[in-house]
Amino acid sequence: MKLAGLCVLAWVLITGCVPLTYPPGEKNAPAHLAKGMYITEDGVHLPVRQWLPDGDVQAVVIALHGFNDYSHFFQQPGDYLKTQGIASFAYDQRGFGLAPQRRLWAGLGAYTADVNQLVALLKQRYPNRPLYLLGESMGAAVIMAAMSQTPKPEVAGIILSSPALWARSTMPWYQSGLLWLLAHSVPWLSLTGEGVKVTPSDNIPMLRALGKDPLVIKGSRVETLYGLTDLMDVAYASAPLLNGNSLLLYGERDDIIPKPPTYAFLQRFLAQQRSQKTVAFYQHGYHLLLRDLQAKSVWQDIVAWIRQPTNALPSGAGLRAGQVLQTLQ
């Protein structure tokens, strides 16, 4: 009886906790841009950074940061793109950086709605300029989810850097099972990843700066990780739905997002050739491609692709991707 009672108690504790999302409030005003802020329809103030060319704006990029990061991630790419006539905007997504409800997961609908609204605002500001969505890791997954929906953002193309594609279907059963168990028993538990040996980048000074930056989140709630995994499920499933012009960037030394789910996604993604799709593999690239030591070659490829998506990338990373993917067939 004691064992049975403990089992019942354990089940009550588990089923009594669920991973929560913290969605937007009621819509109370049109979304708009103010000084240093992107104000959403529900009145949430999301800090926004911008990098504007001194001369004519030839194109516009909206950049979405990765998990636990914030808009500062685009500082160097934004500085470079503005010298090439490309205006860039990056904002702190809900729960990250200086955005409200720090460390809490707002839900897929909130993240994609924020993208849609900002696209509409910047298309009004730059009506005759092509607009692109660029995302790193989680940010790329948000873009993939947004582009899978109806209606989807009206953009000239998407740029996906190290997209977060580690869906549950590609995880070992014990990993996805443990995540479910923790999310339904201790969703508030904070995990730091301390002791996990990964190398996000070869740019060590940059990594040290991230470690000291108080706006970079160092510990993630289990329910937030659960929400991220929901997002990766959607991103992984989006392969046949991404029909617009796309540039996907991947570092072959990326040990954050494993190769098997990335390669499996790419095979399905490239099977749908209804638009211009370019894949680039960087042999010496890591997860934080946009901030690696070789980052400038990645920035140059992005500019070249924006200007002429049908041409070969100057770094040769497109040819490298073709060689690697050919071996998988």
Image: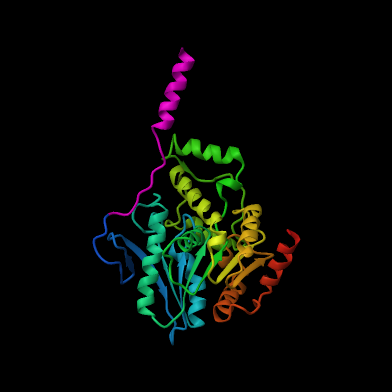
Residue name at image x 56 percent, y 67 percent = 290
Q: Residue furthest left?
A: 28
Residue extending furthest top? 1
Here the colouring is: rainbow
For the point 66% across and 75% down, the residue is 315
Image coords of residue 164 (percent x, y): 55, 56
Seen from the viewer's position, the closer of residues 131 and 249 is 131
Q: Is residue 256 above or below residue 81?
A: above
72 left or right of 194 in image: left
Please check the rendered image and state whether residue 18 is part of the magenta-colored stretch, yes or no: yes
Q: Which residues are magenta?
A: 1-25
How many marks the image carries: the answer is 0
Q: Quadrant of residue 296?
A: bottom right
Q: Residue at x 56, y 69 (%)?
A: 246
Q: Nearer the viewer, residue 132 or 205?
A: 132
Residue 101, position as x, y percentages in the image: 35, 52
Q: Is residue 70 magenta?
A: no
The residue sitting at the right extreme is 327
Up the image or down, 58 lies above or below 37; here it is below
In percent of width and height, residue 126 lies at 39, 80
Residue 182, how many percent across, how many down? 48, 37
- The quadrant in which the C terminus is found is bottom right
Q: Residue at x 42, y 57 (%)?
A: 215
